[in-house]
Image (cartoon, rainbow, N blue to C red):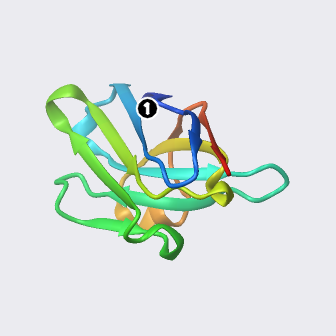
């Protein structure tokens, strides 16, 4: 099991940028694929981005391609989500998760989840 803690959320104007971070502890960070999800009020949790154990392969939801970038720092046991050109509809609680593979994390089948960090985009 991996313990995950998100940070970096906050209030930003439309068109601005934020960089989210997820710090991992417990099971070896390099043993897990990592991903980001978000959930807006009244909506179902949705997949945002994922990165493989090696960091070579990445998956993105169609809605964020070209705007978001996921990366990982194995030495610091941390995964990041760089969010650019933010829109108000991106307002949500963002969660990081861990899973054994890209297929599983993309399907939402993470075995470990963080508590989330709030991202609010104003017009």
Could you say where residue 33 lies in the image, as x and y percent from the top left?
Answer: 33, 51
Query: Hey, which residue is sitting farthest bottom in the picture?
Result: 62
Q: In the rendered view, tell whether residue 102 sits above or below residue 28.
A: below
7 left or right, relative to 87: left
Q: Is residue 8 above or below residue 30?
A: above
Where is residue 52 shown, x and y percent of the image? 27, 57
Q: Exactly how many numbered labels are in the figure? A: 1
Rendered image quadrant of residue 44: bottom right
**What residue would you read off at disc 1?**
1
Tell whether 25 sits left or right of 54.
Answer: right
**Quick one: which residue is furthest to the top in this view?**
25
Q: Quadrant of the N terminus?
A: top left
Which residue is pictured at 46% across the width and 30% down the height? Answer: 8
| Vertical order, 110 against 60 (above or below) | above
Corner quadrant of residue 93: top right
Question: Seen in the image, is 73 located left or right of residue 107?
Answer: left
Left or right, residue 51 beside residue 49: left
Viewer-proximal residue among 5 and 2: 5
Which of 58 and 62 lies nearest the eye of the viewer? 62
Crowding at dot 1, Cα within 10 Å, few <14 / some 14-19 / many 20+, comes out as: few
Q: Secondary structure at mark 1?
A: loop
The residue sitting at 81% across, 49% down in the picture is: 41
Kindly identify the residue that appears in the image at 54 percent across and 38 percent down.
Answer: 113
Toward the right, the furthest residue is 42
The picture places residue 4, in percent across and down from the top left corner, at 46, 29
């Amino acid at each position: 099991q991996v313990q995950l803690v998100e940070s970096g959320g906050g209030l930003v104007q439309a068109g601005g940028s934020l960089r989210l971070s997820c710090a991992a502890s417990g099971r070896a960070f390099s043993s897990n694929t990592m991903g980001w999800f978000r959930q807006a009020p009244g909506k179902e949790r949705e997949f945002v981005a994922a990165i493989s154990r090696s960091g070579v392969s990445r998956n993105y939801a169609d809605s964020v391609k070209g705007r978001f970038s996921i990366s990982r720092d194995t030495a610091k046991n941390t995964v990041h989500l760089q969010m650019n050109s933010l829109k108000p509809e991106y307002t949500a609680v963002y969660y990081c998760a861990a899973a054994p593979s890209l297929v599983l994390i993309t399907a939402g089948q993470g075995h470990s989840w963080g508590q989330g960090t709030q991202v609010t985009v104003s017009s």
